[in-house]
Image (tube, rainbow, N blue to C red):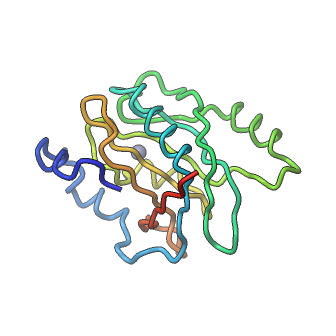
Amino acid sequence: MQEHEDSIAERGVPERFNSHAYLNVLDTSPAEQLCLIQSTALQDIRTSAERHYPHEACGLLLGTLTDKDWHIDEGREVANLNTERSADRFILDPEAYRMVDRELRGTGREIMGIYHSHPDCPAKPSPSDLADAWDSFAYMIVSTYQGHAVDTQCWALNTKGGKFREVTMQEVMV
Ligand SMILES: [Zn+2]
């Protein structure tokens, strides 16, 4: 979901995103699952990413799993505990995760994945994103340039678990 097509091309992609280490985390075959996200949730996630620029925002993707697709109805911002490298790393507050997990118990909704932002970088996962990734979770990345959310992409581990595949996002109007 590229909001401003030329933004990244204009501003240039940091060199590391073209390095072997970065390209090696991507499996270019498309994922079978879809990420269906309610427009209000997507807007909240973009706003969260913009508010934290030039630092990384992070949060939880909440919703329900139907068949194999993720249905995201809420993006819940959570503190980024990494204050030393908040421009390019995030550590999602584990206590907040446990609290949301408890809150959702028995409701039919669950934590479906995690979003975070990439200030001045593409919405593609990095090697450190891969190191932290869990199976069956959706990973949404918002690229922010100069305080604006310019691109949002969704990723998930492939079946072997060694790389990320891009997940097609569909915005559901509510
Ligand atoms: Zn990242």
Question: Horizontal placement of 26 versus 72: left or right?
Answer: left
Q: Is residue 57 above or below residue 73?
A: above
Q: Residue at x 43, y 39 (%)?
A: 46
Q: Quadrant of residue 52?
A: top left
Q: Residue at x 37, y 51 (%)?
A: 126
Q: Is residue 29 above or below residue 39?
A: below
Q: Is residue 51 above or below residue 117?
A: above
Residue 59 locus on image (x, y percent): 56, 38
Residue situated furthest top in the rendering: 83
Question: Horizontal placement of 12 versus 173: left or right?
Answer: left
Residue 55 locus on image (x, y percent): 38, 27
Work out whether residue 26 or residue 106 is closer to the camera in this orientation and state it.
Answer: 106
Q: Quadrant of residue 1?
A: bottom left
Work out whether residue 128 or residue 53 is closer to the camera in this orientation and state it.
Answer: 53
Residue situated furthest front in the rendering: 174
Residue 135 locus on image (x, y percent): 61, 63
Q: Residue at x 69, y 64 (%)?
A: 65
Q: Is residue 161 above or below residue 89?
A: below
Residue situated furthest right in the rendering: 106
Residue 99 locus on image (x, y percent): 77, 34
Work out whether residue 169 or residue 120 is closer to the camera in this orientation and state it.
Answer: 169
Question: Horizontal placement of 15 versus 60: left or right?
Answer: left
Q: How many marks?
A: 0
Ligand 1 quarter of the rendering: top left
